[in-house]
Amino acid sequence: MLKVNFLEELIAEWYQHRGLLVMRNINLKKSVGGGIAGEIDILAFYPPGLQIIHAETSADSKRWRERIKIFKEKFKWPNELYYNELRLPQKARRIDKIAIIHCSDKPRGENRTQFEKETGAKLITFSEFMKSHIIPGISKHSGTIPETFPLLRAIQLTIREINKEMKKKFKGMIVKDLFSQQSN
């Protein structure tokens, strides 16, 4: 039975909802012993911008040294591998490698810098991804998310209910919607 990683599922839903073509759990190259040489959690492609995103997720509680070693292995693949997996006739303009982690300890500056330098991937926490991508993207102004994206829809409906309750509780006061997009 396939283990379902909620973080991987949520990130894949997000990219699909945003219009990217998404492939998940891609087994790479057969190894000499007959197994696989590696796996990609999420490979997303945005055709208009010729952009490829290789996202790896983790909810483990390993030490930073161990994480770096694991992610270094996950992001070691040459760009040609992405073109082959996606069967692209031309090279992408941009390839982003992103590690999204769910952890209780926020990566300190030196851990983040060392991670990004050694793995070649941008490190972002689950909380940061929620704040910078998902919550602004599913604000009340974006319409109802289709039921084919159950995690995103659950988040959207939860935000709407919280906003309704806040408005009831503080009736008569000016209450800005919780999680609404900030204007710069």
Image (cartoon, rainbow, N blue to C red):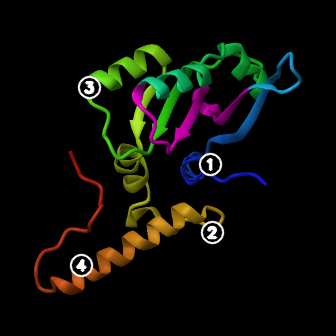
| Left or right of residue 1, residue 69 in this image | left
Q: How far apart are labels 3 and 4 at the CA level?
A: 35 Å
Magenta-highlighted stretch: main secondary structure? strand
Q: Is residue 46 above or below residue 3?
A: above
Residue found at the far left of this picture: 173
Q: Tell me residue 77's x, y (percent).
A: 66, 17
Residue at the spot 68% in from the left edge and 41% down from the top edge: 21
Q: Tell me residue 102's x, y (percent).
A: 44, 45
Q: Give the range drawn in magenta.
A: 38-64
Tag 1: Cα neighbours inside 10 Å, few (<14), some, or many (≥20)? some
Earlier-in-chain disc, 1 versus 3: 1
Tag 2: Cα neighbours inside 10 Å, few (<14), some, or many (≥20)? few
Which amino acid, mark 4?
Answer: Met
Question: Which quarter of the figure has residue 86?
Answer: top right
Q: Tell me residue 115's x, y (percent).
A: 41, 22
Earlier-in-chain disc, 2 versus 4: 2
Evaluate if marks 3 and 2 touch, with contact meaning CB atoms under 8 Å apart: no
Residue carrying label 1: 16
Residue at the spot 47% in from the left edge and 23% down from the top edge: 68
Mark 3 or mark 4: which is in front? 3
- Name the secondary structure under disc 3: helix
Residue carrying label 2: 147
Earlier-in-chain disc, 4 versus 1: 1
Earlier-in-chain disc, 3 versus 2: 3
Q: In this view, does 24 lie above or below 28?
A: below
**Residue 166 has which mark?**
4
Which amino acid, mark 2?
Answer: Glu
Which amino acid, mark 3?
Answer: Gly
